[in-house]
Amino acid sequence: MKNIETLIQEAIALLKSLIQTPSFSSEEEQTALLIENWFTQNNIPFERENNNIWAFNKHFDKSKPTLLLNSHHDTVRPNQGYTKNPFEAIVEDGKLYGLGSNDAGGCLVSLIATFTHFYAAENLPYNIVIVASAEEESSGKKGLNSVLKHLPELECAIVGEPTLMQLAVAEKGLLVLDVIVKGTASHAAHNNPDNPIYNAIPVMEWFKTYQFEKISEVLGPVKMTVTQVTAGKQHNVVPAECHLVVDIRVNDCYNNTEILETVRANVNAEVTPRSMHLNASSIPISHGLVQAGIALGRTTYGSPTLSDQSVLYCKSLKLGPGESLRSHSADEFIYINEIEEGIQLYIKIFTDFFKIK
């Protein structure tokens, strides 16, 4: 078995290769090959579907619960603020620059190195499966959600996203609604008591003022925001419809179906969700993974940002090197020592969680 220092250096080298290989969502073919190559070089059998790669620990036992390790290898497109080549892995002052270095390349290679460390371990109380997934940034149909049908029932998961290696024990879900308020079309010169724009005012007021009863200890209340309003095409015509877009950030006290039912029961409008699968997620503070992290001085918090946790139906913890604020920023970077610390902390947390002496 390779020592931890060797795994760290090889993980950093893999991250540099990933940075230098464009992998926009749905275009991750080449980075998938790099990940395949890691497993091949370490004599670890793997499976691939589309651009998702997954592998199981050597001594997988169907009678044991399964822990999922997951992070993604797709990236957003670089924004116009870059002053460095986003596809060049540049190291300066302890920082590794490049697109996807922080979100979520550092997390991915750290989890891959950690999985490799435990791959051949015998008598683990849990199975381990790692999924290097695609299409996370686009919430696409060929990402982690498409792989779950190939996996055994999952007891819990670690999703690698930049958290400064602190414990994100809950994550808000997302529900985006297209809302159509009806009215009667007419010439603006005529009296019309059924103007859909005016009809939309009480609907928007409801979204502004309604308070869902259950407030999460970690994530706080459900937050609803009207973000787009469109109606009409010319000044002298009252339109037949007023269209709203509503962004709802859902806490872990509700699922998206419950939120949708409440909205439909309270607004006089046609309400259509864009998707229903981006649910809130959480893991109890008492869970062994969380307790292992707390014992190492990690703190817990609730995350407002969305990740592939939203497609999981098991308990899940978001944890990884890097900082969320750097994600999608110009000249994205991760500190080299964050990767070193990340791998060491992952290994320590799992060693405690698995109760390895």
Image: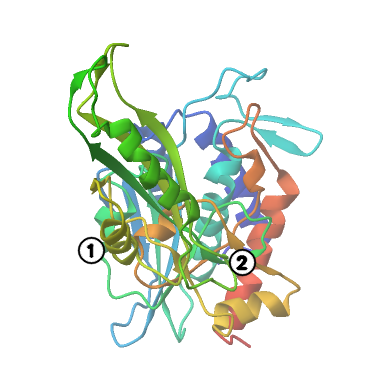
Model colouring: rainbow
Three-letter amino acid code at disc 2? Tyr
The residue located at (57%, 17%) in the rendering is 80
Q: Is residue 41 visible?
A: no
Residue under label 1: 150
The residue located at (82%, 34%) in the rendering is 93
Q: Can residue 117 be seen in this view?
A: yes
Residue under label 2: 346
Image quarter (top left, top right, bottom left or bottom right) of the N terminus = bottom right
Q: Which residue lies furthest to the right in this view?
A: 93
Say the numbered circle drawn on residue 121.
none
The residue located at (57%, 85%) in the rendering is 286
Marks 1 and 2 sit apart, C-alpha to C-alpha, by 25 Å
Q: Nearer the viewer, residue 194 or 126?
A: 194
- 235 over 321 or under it: above or below: above
Q: Which of 353 and 235 is in front in this view?
A: 235
Residue 185 position, x and y percent, is: 18, 24
SS category of the residue bearing label 1: helix
The residue located at (72%, 45%) in the rendering is 336
Three-letter amino acid code at disc 1? His
SS category of the residue bearing label 2: helix
Residue 339 position, x and y percent, is: 67, 51
Residue 251 position, x and y percent, is: 48, 64
Label 2 Cα neighbours within 10 Å, binned few <14 / some 14-19 / many ≥20: many
Image quarter (top left, top right, bottom left or bottom right) of the C terminus = bottom right
Quadrant of the rendered structure where residue 312 is?
bottom left
